[in-house]
Amino acid sequence: MSSQAAIALGAAALFAAMTVFELKRVVHERERELAALERAIAAERARIRILRADLAWLTRPERIATQARQLGLEPARIDRLVRAEDLPDATALLFAGRSLVVELDAGKLFELRFKPFRSREPATNRGGAVRP
């Protein structure tokens, strides 16, 4: 084998060794990143399990019923439920509670107060009976 071929073969072997070493370093770095991500995922999953358990504990019906009694709340009565179409128009509700001061021809000031208007159709409950 000639000396030039030996030098070229040695350089190629050295380049291959350096490439394998760099590749090994990059793989090791990626494995560390992967392990860190897997630990973070495991921690988040544990946190999600804890949050779900907390939610299940906080939304227990007996706990909510106890708090409702302490706050003086009571279940909704059927006569208090309304259909969406029985609700007044949103634009009427926009002016509810507001007032407007106007001057009459005689020079007097008069305060107008807005209130929501009821629809002309009689409201009925679920049984079909007309409500007052």
Image (cartoon, grey):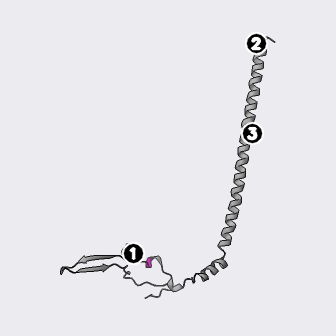
Residue 57 in the image: state x and y as whole percent: 68, 72
Q: Reply yes or no: does residue 60 show up in magenta.
A: no
| Secondary structure type for disc 1 | helix
- Badge 3 crowding class, 10 Å Cα cut-off, few under 14, some 14 to 19, many 20 or more, is few
Query: Spatial distance from mark 2 to mark 3, Cα to Cα?
Result: 36 Å
Taking 50 as reference, is 88 left or right? left
On screen, 132 above or below 86? Answer: below
Which residue is tagged 3? Answer: 28
Of the residues tagged 3 and 1, which is closer to the observer?
3
Query: Spatial distance from mark 2 to mark 1, Cα to Cα?
Result: 95 Å
The tag earlier along the polypeptide, 2 or 1, is: 2
Residue furthest front in the image: 108
SS majority, magenta = helix
| Secondary structure type for disc 2 | helix
Residue 130 in the image: state x and y as whole percent: 44, 87
Residue 93 in the image: state x and y as whole percent: 39, 75
Q: Amino acid at mark 1?
A: Leu
On screen, 99 above or below 3? Answer: below
The tag earlier along the polypeptide, 2 or 3, is: 2
On screen, 126 above or below 58? Answer: below
Which labelled disc corresponds to residue 4? Answer: 2
Q: Is there any visible trace of residue 102 in the rendered image?
A: yes
Q: Is there any visible trace of residue 126 in the rendered image?
A: no
Which residue is tagged 1? Answer: 93
User: Residue shown at 34%/78% (left/top)?
Assistant: 114
- Badge 2 crowding class, 10 Å Cα cut-off, few under 14, some 14 to 19, many 20 or more, is few
Which labelled disc corresponds to residue 25? Answer: none
Quick one: quadrant of the C terminus? bottom left
